[in-house]
Image (tube, rainbow, N blue to C red):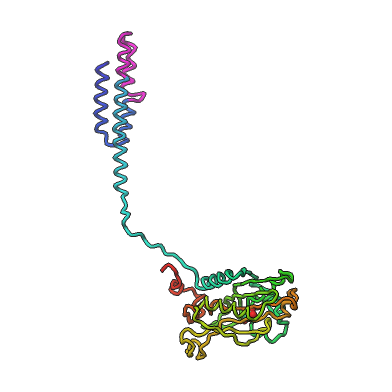
Amino acid sequence: MQERLKELQTEALEKISTAADLKELNDIRVSYLGKKGPITEVLKGMGKLSAEERPKMGALANEVRDSIAAGIEQKQKHHEEAAVKQKLAAEKIDVTLPGRPVKTGNHHPLTRIIEEIEDLFIGMGYTVAEGPEVEKDYYNFEALNLPKGHPARDMQDSFYITEEILLRTHTSPVQARTMEKHEGKGPVKIICPGKVYRRDNDDATHSHQFMQIEGLVVDENIRMTDLKGTLEVFAKKMFGDDREIRLRPSFFPFTEPSVEMDISCKICGGKGCSVCKGTGWIEILGAGMVHPNVLEMAGFDSKKYTGFAFGMGPERIAMLKYGVDDIRHFYTNDVRFLKQFSIHE
Ligand code: DAH
């Protein structure tokens, strides 16, 4: 029995030493140490032994079993380590290789202009207001001193949905809506960017849908000089400190007096060129002192309160600032055009 156990031990340890992988080791474990294995088989014969021999043989059997188990464990560890090493070698990566560039998008040029203008006015204490694009005739026209049948309505060819509802033709209705919310109490100080719609044929300078940014300030003692100073700060921040501005008399039904603001042409320095059509000046926006009728209709006492308003087109500003010659580029969204406004390149 003793010999048989020793034999099994040598046989098993030999097999373990040549086992090629974990699976083979496991097979050895099952066949030698399992319940149906030869060691168990040998131990079944223990009953025939003398009381003296029995514990000795038991101890030997345990020793054999332990040495086989230890052999398996050691070899198993060896195989596991080898497997990890092999895996590491196979999956080795060269961290010094340059990465593949990730294509990133960028803000649309109009978004950039609008955010820039918003930031500028927020810095001067304005808040950003919004209004609906599907608007009531009342806010789009009537509340802005443009009653039904007023000839100035023709300045803004409109998309009507019903007789009383249309796609807003400008962002000025937000003036009326905001003042109404203030219930006759100042101050009001807002900037309002948004989409507007007109029945225009699309060409290099016209689009049936475009953007506007409206500004409105209402309080006691607001004067024309406040308007002029505000617009000057805006123009210089947007186009450069070397630009001059001028206000020309104009007409808008919702302001009195009304003006248009020009900035000096950067390209020719005021001498006259094709961009400024030979005048040395480029028109930027419309503005004026809020008409008393507009204040009164929105619930403000026009004897106590005065205000100024202005409206501008971010497309026009972007075209001038970035030298874009066709408004349609902003809407066709050709990536070759848009990529030029990336701040990453
Ligand atoms: N709403 C005018 C337009 O679309 C622009 C404008 C002019 C807005 C004068 C104003 C303003 O607030 O005071 O042509």
Task: Give the residue at the far top of this rendering.
Answer: 51
Residue toward you, 162 or 44 = 162
Q: Quadrant location of the C terminus?
A: bottom left
Q: Please provide percent x and percent y for residue 86.
A: 29, 44
Residue 241, image x, y percentages: 50, 78
| Place of residue 69 in the rendered image (x, y in percent of width and height, measured from the top left) | 32, 27
Give the side of residue 216 with respect to residue 341, left or right.
right
Q: Which residue does the image show at 48% across and 82% down from the upper left?
A: 325
Q: Is residue 163 visible?
A: no
- The secondary structure making up most of the magenta span is helix
Q: In the figure, residue 191 lies in which quadrant?
A: bottom right
Tell me: residue 27, above or below residue 330: above
Question: Ligand 1 quadrant?
Answer: bottom right
37, 330: nearer the viewer: 330
Residue 141 appearing in the image: yes
* Span highlighted in magenta in the image: 33-61
**Could you tell me residue 263's position as x and y percent?**
53, 83
Residue 14 versus residue 269: which sits nearer the camera? 269
> Was residue 35 drawn as part of the magenta stretch in this picture?
yes
182 in relation to 207, above or below: above
* Residue at screen point 50% across, 85% down: 265
Please give left or right for residue 49 compared with residue 232 in the image: left
Q: In which quadrant of the rendered image does the N terminus lie?
A: top left
Question: Which of 6 and 71 lies nearest the eye of the viewer?
Answer: 71
